[in-house]
Image (cartoon, rainbow, N blue to C red):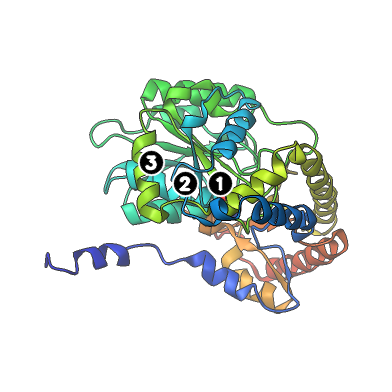
């Protein structure tokens, strides 16, 4: 039936949004939620934003409230080019596209690079929002074998490149959502070399790179292969997600297509938001502000690490993340994090079952815990409850189950 309904059927094949369903459950008032992927609202620089809004409306009312360029606000694009230079990327402001959050960047890349039935490679597990962004374009997801340092180079070398070739690999080198892992400099070099050999370009997503606790992460993947890389950055985790500001850095060959897609999507990211954020950050504000976020998150990371050591039963596995917002926990055999969630919510806590983050065969024993939206005391309480729940569940679990 190739009728008016063809496109509607295509939309209907999209995955249901499991995560939204889960997050609905976890919005119960009073719940100690370790489920959210949100930054701590305590870190939002309210006074600086308020003053900047006022300055922008006083000094540039007409320009800031008018339609604006699809590429983004010029001075902000220059700022981004200078910022990514600190990650080893030598790019011109002409390669910077300001987006409505980095989530929009994922959608734009999906629009211009994904084709129905053509492979897109993702880490195992990967950011659920990227799976959601690419899915409407019906790619074939290739789930890259991955370890504690991210995707394995041999998995990239083995990607299909007969027609239709693998369109790109979606990679998260810094404090990955959901696992918290970081790629070493050596792994980065190997992954880029494998991508180059396989002829598979990469999309690097880096919303958490500034949130390191002891030392900054190695140089960006995009710095190692500029002509084969797209790079996504975001103001959501270092300033506020409320202004919906992100950026996409693209090689000159791809930029015009992305710009066209951006124009079609929303003409431009709100000019007012761009000017306000630029007004806040133009004088080096982030260099003073981000260290306060790191200190807060590191103290919370330490609290959660200690609580997990104290309360989780033997057989649970996790690693203390070196930055970002998440712990990734693997439960002992016989436990299923999705099946346990309703009991967790009844007991007053929430987490995200890890199964949501897999493009293919999910690992039902995994779960993601955020450590940034609760205080250390509440983290201890939440993890103690989780520990109790897991012990009870283990008493009745079938350890021969997968
Ligand atoms: N990529 C990753 C890995 C994320 O975790 C998020 C937000 N949770 C995004 C992109 C989207 O962020 P934003 O649109 O707010 O920039």
Res 229 seen here: yes
Residue at the spot 81% in from the left edge and 46% down from the top edge: 298
- Mark 3: give few (<14), some (14-19) or many (20+) Cα within 10 Å: many
Tell me: residue 156, above or below residue 67.
Answer: above
Residue contact at pointers 3 and 1, CB within 8 angstroms: no
- Mark 2: give few (<14), some (14-19) or many (20+) Cα within 10 Å: many
- Give how far apart the Cα atoms at labels 3 and 1 are: 14 Å
Identify the residue position indicated by label 1 in the image: 246
Q: Position of residue 50 (x, y in %)?
A: 74, 58
Which type of secondary structure does the marked residue at label 1 adopt? strand
Identify the residue position indicated by label 3 in the image: 258
- Mark 1: give few (<14), some (14-19) or many (20+) Cα within 10 Å: many
Of the two numbered discs 2 and 3 on the same chain, state the one appearing first in sequence.
2
Q: Position of residue 123 (x, y in %)?
A: 50, 42
Image quadrant containing the C terminus: bottom right
Mark 1 sits near ligand 1, with its Cβ under 8 Å away: yes
Mark 2 sits near ligand 1, with its Cβ under 8 Å away: yes
Towards the viewer: 318 or 3: 3
Identify the residue position indicated by label 2 in the image: 105
Tell me: residue 346, above or below residue 205.
Answer: below
Q: Position of residue 20 (x, y in %)?
A: 53, 68
Residue at the spot 72% in from the left edge and 43% down from the top edge: 321
Residue contact at pointers 2 and 1, CB within 8 angstroms: yes
- Residue farthest right in this picture: 377
Q: Position of residue 144 (x, y in %)?
A: 46, 39
- Give how far apart the Cα atoms at labels 2 and 3 are: 9 Å
Res 336 seen here: no
């Amino acid at each position: 039936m190739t009728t008016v309904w063809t496109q509607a059927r295509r939309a209907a094949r999209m995955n249901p949004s499991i995560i939204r369903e889960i997050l609905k459950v976890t919005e119960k008032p009073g719940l100690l939620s370790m489920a959210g992927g949100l930054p701590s609202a305590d870190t939002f620089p309210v006074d600086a934003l308020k003053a900047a809004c006022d300055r922008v409306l006083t000094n540039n009312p007409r320009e800031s409230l008018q339609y604006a360029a699809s590429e983004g606000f010029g001075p902000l694009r220059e700022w981004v080019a200078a910022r990514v230079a600190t990650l080893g990327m030598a790019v011109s402001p002409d390669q910077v596209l300001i987006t409505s959050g980095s989530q929009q960047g994922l959608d734009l890349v999906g629009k211009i690079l994904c084709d129905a039935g053509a492979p897109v490679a993702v880490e195992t597990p990967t950011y659920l929002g990227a799976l959601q962004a690419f899915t409407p374009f019906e790619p074939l997801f290739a789930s890259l074998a991955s370890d504690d340092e991210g995707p394995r180079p041999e998995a990239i070398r083995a990607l299909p490149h007969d027609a239709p070739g693998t369109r790109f690999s979606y990679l998260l080198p810094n404090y990955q959502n959901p696992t918290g892992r970081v790629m070493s400099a050596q792994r980065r070099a190997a992954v880029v070399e494998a991508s180059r050999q396989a002829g598979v370009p990469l999309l690097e997503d880096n919303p958490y790179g500034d949130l390191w606790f002891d030392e900054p992460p190695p140089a960006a993947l995009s710095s190692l292969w500029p002509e084969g890389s797209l790079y996504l950055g975001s103001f959501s985790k270092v300033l506020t997600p409320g202004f919906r500001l992100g950026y996409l850095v693209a090689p000159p060959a791809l930029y015009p297509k992305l710009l066209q897609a951006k124009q079609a999507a929303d003409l431009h990211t709100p000019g007012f938001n761009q000017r306000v954020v630029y007004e806040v950050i133009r004088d080096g504000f982030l260099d003073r502000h981000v260290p306060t976020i790191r200190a807060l998150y590191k103290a919370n990371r330490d609290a959660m690490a200690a609580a997990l050591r104290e309360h989780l039963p033997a057989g649970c596995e996790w690693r203390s993340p070196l930055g970002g917002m998440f712990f990734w926990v693997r439960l002992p055999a016989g436990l299923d994090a999705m099946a346990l969630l309703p009991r967790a919510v009844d007991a007053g806590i929430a987490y995200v079952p890890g199964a949501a983050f897999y493009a293919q065969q999910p690992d039902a024993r995994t779960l993601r815990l955020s450590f940034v939206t609760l205080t250390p005391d509440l983290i201890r309480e939440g993890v103690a409850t989780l520990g109790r729940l897991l012990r009870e569940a283990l008493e009745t679990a079938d350890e021969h189950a997968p």
